[in-house]
Amino acid sequence: MSVVERIGPDQVPLLARRYFAAGDPGPIVGALAQVPELLVVAVPLLGAALGPSAIDWRTKEIVIVRTSALAGCRYCVQAHTVVALDAGLSRQEVVALRAEGSAAEVFDSPREVALLGWIEEVAGGGPIDDASRVVMGRHWADHEIVELTMVIGVTLMLNRFATALALPTSPDTLDRLAAEGLL
């Protein structure tokens, strides 16, 4: 059960109404609607970091699923497992990203292996090893490293938000996970 009440359609504050215009906007926006002044600044940041950009969808989902697994965020792992499959990751890749072990064994692209090491370093907290910076710089341009690091950071923020508030996974997502044998 979620820690905070979800805002219902009849309770939506004026500043949050546009996010509910097409129906249920999901648990994250539903929770943020409790503080509409925060919602209106958070959603654009989340959209800029996690939405379409120069970084392809598959790569962003690698970052989101792996970061969420490392942070232990049930909601984000479940929600983004489905998204990652839709983004073209194989079931084996998604399972590896969700596990505690080394996902690098399943991925053979040197670029993705470098990214997985970067995710481990950045999401792990503490100082970043210089060797990781060098490896990342061999495979990714500076602007990509900046964006990927921001995706890791925003994901960690959402992981803590979703975990602290015990946000519920949608029944449709749970059904898809069960059908894929990933629940």
Image (cartoon, grey):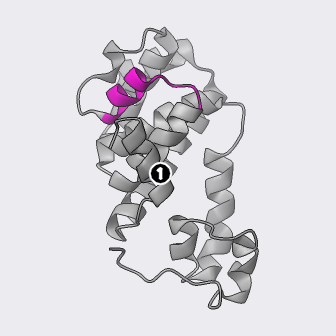
User: Looking at the picture, does residue 135 appear above or below residue 16?
Assistant: above
Q: Could one spot residue 48 in this view of the protein?
A: yes
Seen at 39% across and 55% down, the residue is 75
Quarter holding residue 4: bottom left
User: Three-letter amino acid code at disc 1?
Assistant: Thr
User: Looking at the picture, does residue 134 appear above or below residue 60?
Assistant: above
Does residue 102 appear to the left or right of 51 in the view shown?
left
Query: What residue range appears in magenta?
Result: 87-98
Q: How many marks?
A: 1
Q: Quick one: 41 or 74, which is closer to the camera?
A: 74
The residue pinned by badge 1 equals: 173
Q: Quick one: 122 or 111, which is closer to the camera?
A: 111
Percent across and percent down for residue 131 are 36, 18
Image quarter where the N terminus lies is bottom left
Judge whether residue 9 is colored magenta: no
Seen at 46% across and 24% down, the residue is 115
Image quarter where the C terminus lies is top left
User: Looking at the picture, does residue 168 appear above or below residue 48?
Assistant: below
Q: Could one spot residue 128 in this view of the protein?
A: no
Seen at 33% across and 26% down, the residue is 96
Percent across and percent down for residue 149 are 51, 38
Seen at 44% across and 83% down, the residue is 5
| Mark 1 crowd level (few <14, some 14–19, many ≥20, 10 Å Cα) | some
